Image (cartoon, rainbow, N blue to C red):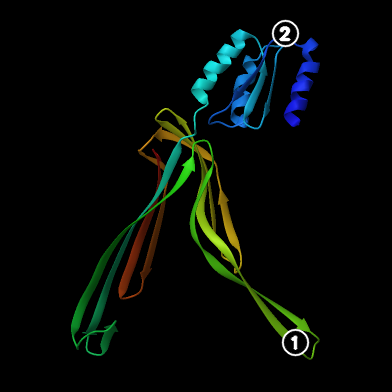
Amino acid sequence: MRFTLMLLSMLVNAPLLADYPLEIIELKGRSMEEVLPIIRPFIDNDGAVSSMNNQLILRTSPESLRDIRAILMRIDTPPRRLLISVRHGVHSDVKTGTIAADIDVMIGKRTKVIVGQPGSDGSVRLRGLNADTHDNTELVGNIQAIEGKPAFIATGKSLPITSYRTYGDSEYRHFESDTQYRDATTGFYALPRLNGQQVTLEISPHQNSPGKSPGSFEVMQASTSVSGWLGEWISLGRLTHYQNNRQSDIHYSAGSSQSREHNIWLKVEEIR
């Protein structure tokens, strides 16, 4: 019924349009939302275009119709199925060092100096300890997606958040607790677009992590675009954290340094 009314509406308005034949083209792979913005500029000023279900309904000149059919032959193809892989690489180095002096000696005839934990009278002992720890961790995940459609990728865990409530009068007090779970995740939305063998990804990363105060969360969001070739790893960025600690006393000195590097890569492959 709707289709009939649409045709009648176009016929009623025919005096306002040129005497072009009515053309109906059924789309094969793309949606109307993708196709209409592309072909509208090719419709003559005295022509018209509308859509219903998966069909284009056109009134335009033969030359314009020929151009539109040529465009549809190029763009009206089934969207390509993709596999998006995400690789997280974490490399950490921890270095610790300690030097301690243990002294038990006489200074003169009546003065004795004892520092640290000496082994015996009249001894001076120097102790040192150094340790290096290296850790390399890689996590790879993947998800299937459709060209031009967003995909959501995230990893994390659910954390229990407990809230407390008291009620009652001054003589009798009651306590009640309620525990709910909140997701602490790191991930992003990825929107892939293809041009031959080249892929462009619109990335919207997010991170929800526990805050410093109980029950609070810190939220980070951003947006960027990267491009590369199908089948190759594309670097999204790197985060490096350094930390140095040092302590000293009369008989010892201790220090530690820690570096942590977090890299994220994406790879898009076509599923055939």
Instruction: Out of 251 and 133, give the one closest to the viewer.
Output: 133
Height in image: 121 above or below 243?
A: below
Q: Could you say whether the residue bearing mark 2 is in a helix, strand or loop?
A: loop
The image position of residue 95, as x and y in percent, is: 30, 63
Q: Could you say whether the residue bearing mark 1 is in a helix, strand or loop?
A: strand
Dividing the picture into quadrants, the one containing residue 216 is bottom right
* Quadrant, the C terminus: top left
* Quadrant, the N terminus: top right
Residue 210 at least partly seen: no
User: Which is more N-terminal, label 2 or label 1?
Assistant: 2
The image position of residue 53, as x and y in percent, is: 65, 32
Amino acid type at mark 2: Asp
Quickly name the residue at label 2.
19
Height in image: 73 above or below 91?
A: above
**Number of residues whose C-alpha sits closer than 10 Å to that of mark 1, classed few (under 14), some (14–19) or many (20 or more):** few
Amino acid type at mark 1: Arg
- 10 left or right, relative to 102: right
Residue 256 at least partly seen: yes
Instruction: Out of 185 and 259, give the one closest to the viewer.
Output: 185
Dividing the picture into quadrants, the one containing residue 132 is bottom left
Dot label at residue 107: none
Q: What residue is rendered at 61% in x and 9% in y?
A: 62
The image position of residue 152, as x and y in percent, is: 52, 48
- 100 left or right, relative to 10: left
Q: Nearer the viewer, mark 1 or mark 2?
A: 2
Q: CA distance from mark 1 to mark 2?
A: 85 Å
Q: What residue is rendered at 72% in x and 28% in y?
A: 3
Dot label at residue 173: 1
The image position of residue 125, as x and y in percent, is: 20, 78
**What number of labels is visible?**
2
Q: What residue is rendered at 75% in x and 87% in y?
A: 173
